[in-house]
Amino acid sequence: MATLLDLSIRVDKLPKEKFVKGKPKEVNGKMETPIYYNFTVAVNDDTNDWGQNVSAFDSQTKEEREAKKQKEYLGNGKVFWTTGTVVAAERKTEDQKETARIEQPMDDLPF
């Protein structure tokens, strides 16, 4: 783990039309459809006057970014612990997932 942050989101500012329905699934014997909201979190190098260096805003489409649409800020926060190292996440391909599964050692088996 490289970084932990606290973040407060203004839920009253979340545009209802941007909520996304997930795939229905069974939870405790009942079918439920999860609801998601996509937002972007930025960790800044500088701290503002309130001791915050994290901001969250509504995710934008490529077209919105290219049109220079103004960001809709949803909340702010701060980094409260870090090792000083943050790396970009990379999506694994199916080939990489299969290789990773095969190469895992089996030393931790209880028998």
Image (tube, rainbow, N blue to C red):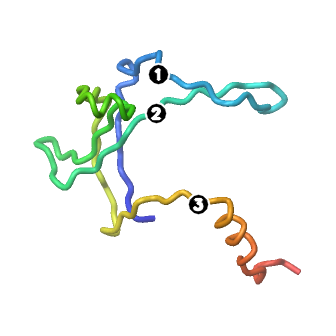
State the SS at label 2: loop
Which marked residue is nearer to the observer: mark 3 or mark 2?
3
Can you identify the residue that label 2 sits on?
38
Where residue 49 appears, as percent x and y from the top left, is 10, 42
Label whose residue precedes the other's in the sequence (3 or 2): 2
Mark positioned earlier in the residue sequence (2 or 1) = 1
Image quarter of the N terminus:
bottom left
Residue 56 rendering spot, x and y as whole percentages: 32, 37
For this rendering, which residue is in front, 91 or 39? 91
Label 3 close to label 2 by CB (< 8 Å): no
Picture quadrant of residue 63: top left
Q: Are marks 2 and 1 in contact (CB under 8 Å)?
A: yes
Which residue does the image show at 54% across and 57% down from the upper left? 91
Q: Residue at x 82, y 78 (%)?
A: 109
Disc nearest the viewer among 1 and 3: 3
Q: Indicate which disc residue 18 carries.
A: 1
Mark 3: give few (<14), some (14-19) or many (20+) Cα within 10 Å: few
